[in-house]
Image (cartoon, helix red, strand yellow):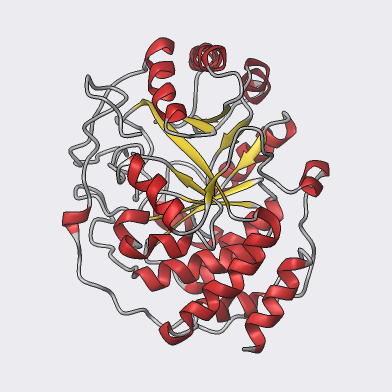
Amino acid sequence: MDLLNTLVEKGLRRELPTREEALAVLATTDDELLDVVAAAGKVRRQWFGRRVKLNYLVNLKSGLCPEDCSYCSQRLGSKAGILKYTWLKPDEASKAAAAGVAGGAKRVCLVASGRGPTDKDVDRVSKTIEAIKDQNEDVEVCACLGLLSDGQAERLRAAGADAYNHNLNTSEATYGDITTTHTYADRVETVQQAQAAGMSACSGLIAGMGETDADLVDVVFALRELDPDSVPVNFLIPFEGTPLAKEWNLTPQRALRILAMVRFVCPDVEVRLAGGREVHLRTMQPLALHLANSIFLGDYLTSEGQAGQADLEMIADAGFEVEGTDTTTLPEHRGGGGCASACGEPAADEDASPEIPAARTDLVSVRRRGAGTDLAPNA
């Protein structure tokens, strides 16, 4: 179809699609789905070949967050039966990270619940980064600690942090419907602070929160303008005990279309298949590897993922290979700056309401192993 040919050509040139084109990807039918995946797959292979980067999460501090993010099982007032614990010691976090590295992870993501770190927390995380780097010299470390205060990004970078994650999550227009204790602008500012400090910026979205197609396009275009090096695409895990527990708005086909749209808008960026992939993509996860070039290995922050070995087998079975530490993830041209380009943005049509599938609460499992427990992690 002409749309897909145009999008492939633009992706190979790193040219931004129009908003109309991005919306058209989300509006394609299930009969067109394999054509969409094949087209976006050409763009993915142009910039990343058949490599898949593995990332591993370590939840340094779980639960009891003062923020009211509606999607989060760790939020203020959450009744989700998740693990709750205070800060892991540096040696505990390093041990947890080592399990992921042994499983093939190239990047370790250190995450802590809360609005943002205190200076004491930054000292604590800095020691954790140093402990991990001492044991695994080549591993990348990404910190995700919430909103940063002046000077904190520079201190994390000096401690050895390679990247900082702070997701935009949804469109600016609807952000206040999801969270009231901080603003969309706060999130943008933190990503920019990380970039200014010399860290690789990681910022993405959460799909499936009841947003429209226009909201999805808005946030992905905003990410393109912000120009992070990696864009995690999360699919809402509707935890019982959170305000969005009843939001089962995704099908595997819609999840694939969302990933394809992100790839067309961000052709040469590390697109990471993140939380919720097992819940919403299910048996169609291997198709998503044709769109995303990066995944999380094993478990997430408060929910369990599929077994790490199953991830490795899925990658091999789909004809892809795990990216080694001796390979640079991003294309060479991204080392010299951003790739955002301006283009016209025609007005979007109103989105049709998707059919809501039946809830599959049986697919959501609370994490009971790994960091903060005495049980071995899933890696």
- Quadrant of the rendered image containing residue 353: bottom left
Residue in the picture at 24% in, 41% down: 78
Residue in the picture at 47% in, 28% down: 101
Q: Position of residue 205 (x, y in %)?
A: 50, 54
In the rendered image, the vertical position of residue 18 relative to residue 279, given as above or below: below
In the rendered image, the vertical position of residue 146 relative to residue 45, given as above or below: above
Q: Position of residue 85 (x, y in %)?
A: 28, 22
Residue 221 vs residue 357, the one in the foreground: 357
Residue 340 vs residue 118, the one in the foreground: 340
**The C terminus lies in which quarter of the figure?**
top left
* Residue 280 in sight in this render: yes
In the rendered image, the vertical position of residue 40 relative to residue 378, given as above or below: below
Residue 98 vs residue 86, the one in the foreground: 98
Residue 328 vs residue 271, the one in the foreground: 328
- Quadrant of the rendered image containing residue 304: top left
Residue in the picture at 49% in, 32% down: 109
